[in-house]
Image (cartoon, rainbow, N blue to C red):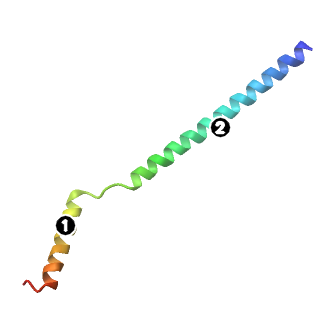
């Protein structure tokens, strides 16, 4: 009887350990996906923004026939 209980306890401990490993792997994958999402939403460099602003200002001046 005690032998069956020991076997059952060992089996349940193994299943529990496996489930914890799977849960940890899923959590790590979620963290990696969040980090990738943050990296994808990067702000463009300031020089690119400044150049784009200059182009828009020039176009506005041309439309107003400032030249």
Q: Which mark is residue 38?
A: none
Quadrant for residue 53, please give it.
bottom left
Quadrant for residue 62, please give it.
bottom left
Residue at 11% x, 86% y: name it: 65
Quadrant in which the N terminus appears: top right
Q: Marks 2 and 1, how far apart in space?
A: 49 Å
Residue at 20% x, 74% y: name it: 56
Residue at 44% x, 46% y: name it: 35
Quadrant for residue 55, please give it.
bottom left
Q: Is residue 11 above or below residue 67?
A: above
**Going by the picture, which residue comes out furthest to the front?**
64
Q: Position of residue 4 (x, y in %)?
A: 89, 18
- Mark closest to the chain's N terminus, 2 or 1: 2
Check disc 2 and report its element: helix, strand or loop.
helix
**Going by the picture, which residue comes out furthest to the bottom?**
65
Q: Given contact means CB atoms under 8 Å apart, are the residues at marks 2 and 1 in contact?
A: no
Q: Which mark is residue 22?
A: 2
Compared across the picture, whether 57 is left or right of 7 comes to left
Residue annotated with mark 1: 51
Compared across the picture, whether 61 is left or right of 21 comes to left
Total marks placed: 2
Residue at 23% x, 63% y: name it: 48
Quadrant in which the C terminus appears: bottom left
């Amino acid at each position: 009887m005690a032998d069956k209980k020991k076997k059952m306890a060992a089996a349940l401990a193994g299943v529990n350990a496996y489930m914890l490993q799977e849960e940890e792997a899923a959590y790590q994958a979620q963290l990696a996906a969040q980090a990738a999402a943050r990296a994808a939403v990067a702000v463009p460099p300031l020089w690119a923004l400044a150049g784009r602003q200059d182009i828009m200002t020039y176009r506005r001046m041309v439309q107003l026939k400032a030249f």
